[in-house]
Image (cartoon, rainbow, N blue to C red):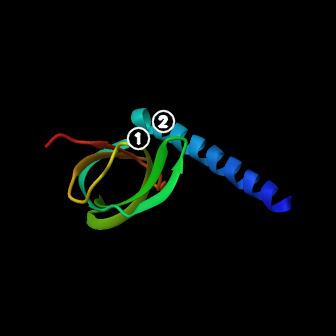
Amino acid sequence: MTILLITLLIRKLRKWQQKKQLQWQQTLTSKGIGFRTKILQVPEEARLLNGYRKIHVMAMIRVKGKNVCYRMHTWIKQGETLHAGERVLIRYQPGVHNVLIKHVAI
């Protein structure tokens, strides 16, 4: 009984976290700093929640004049995919690893 209760609480916490992150991504569409870059690596997390997948992305960004490999994460819909080498528009807020990623036409 206790294990079932803990499992339900963990699921509820994950859904709440996903909801907050999706709200944050919505905020980034209007207030985030945007830049274009190529994706270096996409190690995908297998977790699927409410039709969204959480993925981690490695991309090169310029910080204080230096190119830095930066790891960030985002939620994307089930049917969407990202691949290494694709050019994307990333909107972010400095100091936060949750970003909004949009495909860019080449």
Location of residue 33 with respect to 60 vertically, above or below: above
Q: Which mark is residue 32?
A: 1
Asked whether disc 2 touches disc 1, contact meaning CB atoms under 8 Å apart, the reply is: yes
> Which of the two discs, 2 and 1, labels the residue nearer the N terminus?
2
Work out which quarter of the rendered image holds the C terminus and state it: top left
- The percent position of residue 75, horizontal first and vertical second, equals 46, 47
Q: Position of residue 4 (x, y in %)?
A: 79, 57
Q: Residue at x 65, y 44 (%)?
A: 16
Nearer the observer, 85 or 2:
2
Residue drawn at (75%, 52%) of the image: 9
Disc 2/disc 1 C-alpha distance (Å): 7 Å
| Relative to 34, 19 lies left or right | right
Residue at which label 2 appears: 27
Seen at 26% across and 47% down, the residue is 88
Above or below 27: residue 70: below
Name the amino acid, label 1.
Gly
- Give the crowd class for mark 1: few <14, some 14-19, many >=20 residues within 10 Å: some
Q: Residue farthest to the left?
A: 106
The disc placed on residue 103 is none
Specify the farthest residue to the right.
1
* Kind of residue indicated by mark 2: Thr
Which secondary structure lies at badge 1?
loop
**Relative depth, front residue between 106 and 8:** 8
Give the residue drawn at x 68%, y 51%: 11
Foreground residue among 74 and 60: 74
Taking the image as shown, residue 20 lies to the left or right of residue 65, namely: right
- The x, y position of residue 95, in whole percent, is 48, 56
The residue lying toward the viewer, choosing from 78 and 41, is: 78
Please identify the quadrant where the N terminus is shown: bottom right
How many numbered marks, from 0 up?
2
